Amino acid sequence: MRIGVFAVGRLKSGPEKELAARYFDRFSKAGPPIGLEFSRVTEVNESRASSSDTRKREEGQMLEKALPDGAVLLLLDERGKAMGSEDFANLLGQFRDQGRRELMIAIGGADGLDQSLRERADATVCFGKMTWPHQLVRILIAEQLYRAVTILSGHPYHRA
């Protein structure tokens, strides 16, 4: 299963971008033997609309355009389900084992994600009830993808 990340906002050069890239690289090397492949990070600019609802709708439309046909849509949202790393790994494994070919993980903009995306999503996950800047969320999801591969393959990186 090919896994991509859609992010509203662009990472500038610096330590955040380097750390996210390091974990995406680890994931891309460790994932293929267990059927998980890193496809890409799609970055879009934040909408400049004057209202929050319009910004979310415009950003959601950009996500819909980037979403491959039939792809699993996993949202990262503070209203999502909190889960441990093993549960997250198992969720990815379930989608893979169902024969799903593509999965897109979406990181919303400053205003969050549009309701239409929540209705369309196959899963919504949170990294706790706190709000995180998109730069840190990108690092967190990159690390969790790598960790998921190590859990599913029995590698000792993850220690409970």
Image (spheres, rainbow, N blue to C red):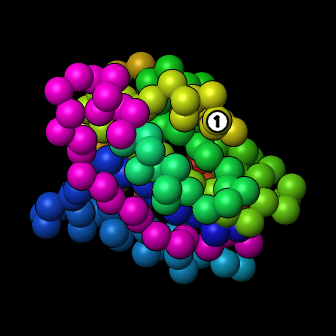
Determine crowd level at label 1: few under 14, some 14-19, many 20+ residues with C-alpha closer than 10 A: few
Q: Position of residue 50 (x, y in %)?
A: 17, 27
Q: Quadrant of residue 13?
A: bottom left
Q: Seen in the image, is 14 located left or right of residue 21?
A: left
- Identify the residue position indicated by label 1 in the image: 120
Residue displayed at 45% across by 29% down: 114
Towards the viewer: 95 or 24? 95
Q: How many numbered marks appear?
A: 1
Q: From where the camera sits, is residue 149 visible? A: no
Q: Would you place residue 74 above or below residue 145 in this image?
A: above
Q: Position of residue 45 (x, y in %)?
A: 24, 52
Q: Amino acid at mark 1?
A: Arg
Q: Would you place residue 50 above or below residue 34 in this image?
A: above
Residue displayed at 67% across by 60% down: 69
What residue span does the magenta drawing correspond to? 34-58
Residue displayed at 34% across by 23% down: 53
Q: Seen in the image, is 67 located left or right of residue 63?
A: right
User: Quarter of the image containing the N terminus?
Assistant: bottom right
Q: Seen in the image, is 99 located left or right of residue 127?
A: right
**SS class of the residue under badge 1?**
helix
Q: Position of residue 144 (x, y in %)?
A: 51, 51
Instruction: Look at the image and say whether residue 52 sits in the magenta stretch.
Output: yes
Q: Would you place residue 25 above or below residue 118 in this image?
A: below
Q: Quadrant of residue 6?
A: bottom left
